[in-house]
Image (cartoon, rainbow, N blue to C red):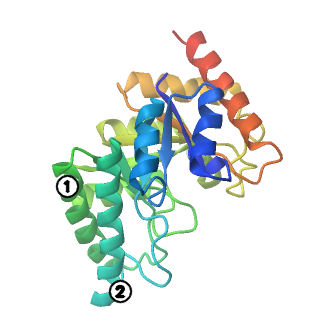
């Protein structure tokens, strides 16, 4: 299993966080754009042997600006931030970047958003990066189905779905059916658990997720030939976030081994 973890599961200095997840057995991490910005920290990361899989490109976008804004100046500020994040991801050797949709699902907004994302996807493609859109309950693309339909309408070859297992639990979508529907449009996977209502980012099997469902999810990924990483995205406010990452990692590896 090609397993990563989102480094924002741990608070504290980024070097310390990477050191901790390395000691927990991880060899790959996902980062946010502001991580490892200076040359010294980048050199340390390269020397550590830790691989960067994915960067959350629009995280940390300045307050009040968004990629889907109708105001040119506001949209430009969001685009500048995302472009810098994509360039940073390429510099760190990541293979994937992703964005989260805005809150306005109006037709004009979504057309505008699609055009911006097509441009971003093209920029990412030049740098050798996949550009993904994450389905997010409560926002403009709340389900896997809605996100895939949006991607179909935008119709850019470098726009993919980021499938989040916890989000599918909230929206009530079957993960196997969602993965099968995505097919070759599946670009990345987040693994986390919750109570079926809130986006809690619990350790795997600490919420409504079952071993059977997780095992079926892994089988579905194999059936469509998904070869990318799956990444644990857990909550830094859990009582023991590093322990939660360890337990979730062991769970993933055990169930993946059972399926071989």
* Rendered image: mark on residue 141: none
Q: Are marks 1 and 2 in contact (CB under 8 Å)?
A: no
Lateral position of residue 150 relative to residue 42, left or right: left
Q: How many marks?
A: 2
Judge whether 110 appears above or below 50 on screen: below
Residue visible at 35% across and 45% down in the picture: 92
Can you name the residue that lies furthest to the right here? 239
Q: Is residue 18 above or below residue 39?
A: above
- Residue 194: x and y in percent read 72, 48
**Closer to us: 153 or 90:** 90
Q: Is residue 77 above or below residue 95?
A: below
| Residue 119 coordinates in the image, percent (x, y) | 20, 65
SS at badge 1? loop
**SS at mark 2 in the image:** helix
Q: At which x and y percent is residue 8?
A: 60, 51
Task: Mark 1 or mark 2: name the one nearer the start of the chain.
Answer: 2
* Label 2: how many Cα within 10 Å (few below 14, some 14–19, many 20+): some
Q: Which mark is residue 74?
A: 2
Residue at horizontal 53 percent and vertical 38 percent from the top: 231
- At 46% across and 48% down in the image, what residue appears? 41
Is residue 172 at all visible to an observer of this figure? Answer: no
What residue occupies the far front of the structure in this picture? Answer: 40
As drawn, the label of residue 156 is: 1
Residue 257's quadrant in the figure? top right
Question: Residue at left 67%, top 24%?
Answer: 251
């Amino acid at each position: 299993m090609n397993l990563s973890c989102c480094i924002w599961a741990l608070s504290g200095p980024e070097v310390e966080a990477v050191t901790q997840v390395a000691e927990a057995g991880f060899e790959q991490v996902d980062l946010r754009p502001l991580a490892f910005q200076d040359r010294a920290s980048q050199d340390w990361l390269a020397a550590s042997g830790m691989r960067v899989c994915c960067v959350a490109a629009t995280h940390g976008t300045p307050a009040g600006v968004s990629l889907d804004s109708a105001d040119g100046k506001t949209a430009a500020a969001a685009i500048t931030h995302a472009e810098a994040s994509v360039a940073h991801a390429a510099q760190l050797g990541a293979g994937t970047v992703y964005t989260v949709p805005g809150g306005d699902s109006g037709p004009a907004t979504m057309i505008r958003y699609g055009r911006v994302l097509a441009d971003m996807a093209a920029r990412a493609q030049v740098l050798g990066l996949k550009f993904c859109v994450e389905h997010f309950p409560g926002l403009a693309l709340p389900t896997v189905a809605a996100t895939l339909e949006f991607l179909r309408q935008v119709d850019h070859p470098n726009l993919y779905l980021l499938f989040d297992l916890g989000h599918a639990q909230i929206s009530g979508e079957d993960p196997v059916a969602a993965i099968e529907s995505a097919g070759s449009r599946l670009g990345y996977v987040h693994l986390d658990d919750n109570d079926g209502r809130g986006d809690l980012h619990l350790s795997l099997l600490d919420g409504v997720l079952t071993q059977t469902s997780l095992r079926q999810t892994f089988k579905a990924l194999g059936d469509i030939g998904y070869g990318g990483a799956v990444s644990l995205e857990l909550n830094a406010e859990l009582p023991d976030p590093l322990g939660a990452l360890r337990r979730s990692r062991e769970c993933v590896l055990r169930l993946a081994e059972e399926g071989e």
